[in-house]
Amino acid sequence: MSNLLLLIPIALFLGLLGLGAFLWSLRSGQFDDMEGAANRILFDDDDDQFAPKSKKFHHNDS
Amino acid sequence: MTQPALCRHCQEPVTASSPAGPDFCCAGCAGAYELLGELGLSSYYKRRAVDPKIRALRPDEETLGSLDFTELASTDDSGTHHLNLMVDGIHCAACVWLIETLLQRNDAVTRARVNMTTRRLRLSWQGATSDIGAILSPVLQMGYRLIPFDPAALEQATVSRNKELLRCLAVAGFAAGNVMLLSVSVWAGYFQGMGGATRDLFHWLSALIALPAAAYAGMPFYRSALGAIRNRRVNMDVPISLGVILALGMSLAQTIRSEPHAYFDSAITLLFFLLIGRYLDGRARGQARSAAEHLLSLNARSITVIDDDGTRRLIAPHKAEPGMVVLTAAGERIGIDGEVIDGQSDIDTSVITGESIPVLTRPGKTVFAGTTNISAPLRIRVTATGGNTLLSEIVRLMENAEQGRAKYVAIADRVAKSYAPVVHFLSLATFVGWWLIGGLAWQDALMNAIAVLIITCPCALALAVPVVQVIATGRLLRAGILVKSATALERLTKITGIVFDKTGTLTTGKPELVSQTDAETLELAARIAANSNHPLSRALVRATGNVAAMANVTEQPGLGLTAHTPFGTILLGSRTFCDIAENADLPSDVTGPELWLAEPGKSPTRFVFRDTPRSDAVTVVDTLRARGFDMTLLSGDRSSTVRQLAETIGLRDWHARMSPTDKAGFVQKRADDGKFDLMVGDGINDAPALACAHASMSPATAAEISQNAADIVFQGDRLGAVIEAIDVARKADRLVRQNFALSFAYNLITIPLAVSGFVTPLIAAIAMSSSSLIVIANALRLHAKTSGQSPNLDIAPLRPTSQQAGA
């Protein structure tokens, strides 16, 4: 029985962690553009014909 | 017809008259190509995938920098300016990459991000606000159109509502998963002999998770139920809220008294499933609405006002006042009703009258908002504004007609209206029956009543209908058919008659050459015609394919073209312009708008044009007739033209010379006779009829007001969208009815069990979840069964058309 007292809180904690992560990602706008993110990775950072400027590309939506 | 070469930048065919030929269709495209080469971004052309449904990237179509974005930018505390823009012309991910890269090359820009789903750009930059013109100019030069929008005003309500639903869904999902985990142990414990203390511990843990989660995740239902009760109505959310609250309260009481039965799992799973349905429903509606808003905002235009001192400024059409002088460029849509004071031009009035051939206008004539100025600039004095324009008169007609439609009640609501009281009555009867007649303690009687509420809880109603609708609208959306109204598909299933508009609906709205002429004469005419934007001239050029424009040609708007050649003056234009006797030999079988070519020393040649039907119009009409639809053609055009078309495509019932009011009246009269009509139309003159028909469809080339009035907007050149929409609607309707039948059959078995007190929490949870899963699985059949085999699916447009009305 004592293992239950340990395992149930752990399970709940992990579940809450996942819930928290989801709510955070929802709030930070990561679900706003479902198509773009999938395609964006194909295009960024392979600017072979042009020396990239030092300016950083900003990725995170806030 | 040989296919001409495609422009390297915009992929549109290059006409021989192109100033930047043979590689480019226009100077703008050549400039854009060169600019990308200089910036080292030519790889864009390799990466992109041109979507034929989207407007081609043609810089010349729009005057650059006509909009001043400076005033629209907002500045935050750190001195960074922000601007939200809607981007038109995004074809694929490469366009997103190109726009972002072009903007980021500018050092002032701190952030440029395009949302590919909503096609919106959020731009942040430092420095002066007025730099914005320079920052955006490379993007405009590429041919993208940027339209400012106010993110706060647009769809904010739906977005925040959907986010709330998603949050509730997450919380309910988390709680349902964990409570179910504990419940499964408790159920297993029934058979394996779980100790009472362990069971109580699990019940307490379940209560700890389920109560706060249900309090939060159930908010959308509680709110709507309260609202309904305040208005003395009963909606679906009342039994849901009642069931959830009672089940939780009773379970808590059971837990406190260490009794074996608790319904925490059922209550929270119920919420979870219902939230899925709610969320899907909200998302589908939101998507349709934002697509419609996108279409409409692209068409929003400003007008150029000339002040007394000669300065020009852009204002919104609704801000115009009578007496102002407005300049309308060739090719521009007229934004106001007014009287022409200077200039002579052809006006395309097809959106208002349905007539496919432009009318000549000169000083003193009246022009109407919504029509398009074709050949030469006009100065117009505003005579009517706001509520007095012809346009707003039509809007008023349309709004009147729409009120009838708002009364339509969706099938789910109709069922819910009769279902909810039955559920309430049954569970009350169970409680009273067990308590007073059956002699149980009131707690046990209440447990049985709750079991009835949970078992009957309308999962199927709340879940099955939204799932079917989401899948149906999603399927149509992929085929380029946009369902704007939530009940449109349902209304579409009742259709028995179809009313078509002519110009732009059954026909393409573009005249095509139909008479036979020898190739040499045709080419000469086309070379002259290449100098003009008149629809008939364009048709001549199209008919020959690839010709170079002749030099030394002048145009007299409304009359014709004069070419000055070494061999004398050649005239191309109307009969009077070419000075041809009225009784010249006319082959009587060909009628329609005509052009004459008069060469010195030769007999004049006549070119006859016709507004040709859409490529699949005949097949579609035949198919629809074979299915028993009763079809009518209504047009504002002349009788001869309408008869000709009706005969070509085999429509027996046609009416010509119909005004907007006539059309609406015709449709209304049929509706009063108890007929359910689908109206398909595109012009402003169709808008009232679109609004008062039982259901309505409009092509994406339609006037914005018609798209607003229509339930369904379809893209592309093919009329097959009508069949496709009706097919999908009927299939969806069948599935919805099957789902209702399934869940009622389910209830027929489980309600007697629940009323007689045999339902334990285990049975309730299984019955509820499995019925939900079955209706979802049934709804998914719409997806699986039809995605490959339907012959009508192939409605992808051959050429981009969505912008022709506005360009």
Image (cartoon, coloured by chain):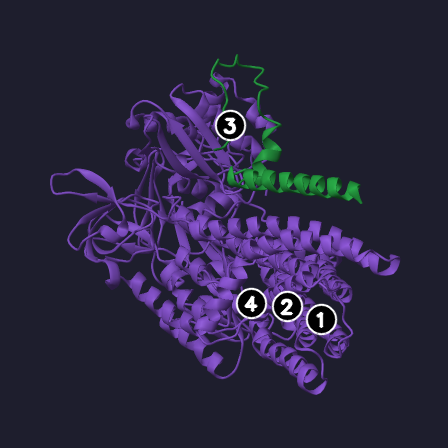
Q: Are marks 3 and 4 in contact (CB under 8 Å)?
A: no
Image quadrant in which you'd find residue B620 = bottom right
Give residue B337's position: percent from left, percent from top: 25, 57
What residue did someone put label 2 on?
B461
Tell me the crowding category of disc 3: few under 14, some 14 to 19, or many 20 or more residues within 10 angstroms, Cα based. many
What residue did someone put label 4 on?
B237
| Disc marking residue B374 | none
Pointer 1 and pointer 3 on the same chain:
yes
Q: Chain of mark 4?
A: B
Give residue B550's position: percent from left, percent from top: 40, 35
Residue type, numbered disc 3 = Leu
Q: Are marks 2 and 1 in contact (CB under 8 Å)?
A: yes
Q: In the rendered view, tell whether residue B640 sits above or below residue B269.
A: below
Residue type, numbered disc 1 = Ser
Look at the image and tell me in which quarter the C terminus of chain B lies.
top left
Along the viewing direction, whichever of B32 and B285 lies nearer the viewer: B285
| Disc marking residue B743 | 1
Report the residue at 28% width, 36% height from top.
B71
Q: Colour of chain B?
A: purple
What residue did someone put label 3 on?
B98
- Label 2 to label 4, Cα distance in Å? 11 Å
Give residue B748's position: percent from left, percent from top: 74, 77
Q: Which chain is green?
A: A
In front of the other: label 3 or label 2? 2
**Helix, strand or loop at mark 3:** helix
Labels 1 and 4: the sequence-earlier one? 4
In front of the other: label 1 or label 3? 1
Q: Are marks 1 and 4 in contact (CB under 8 Å)?
A: no
- Label 3 to label 4, Cα distance in Å? 48 Å
Along the viewing direction, whichever of B581 and B16 lies nearer the viewer: B16
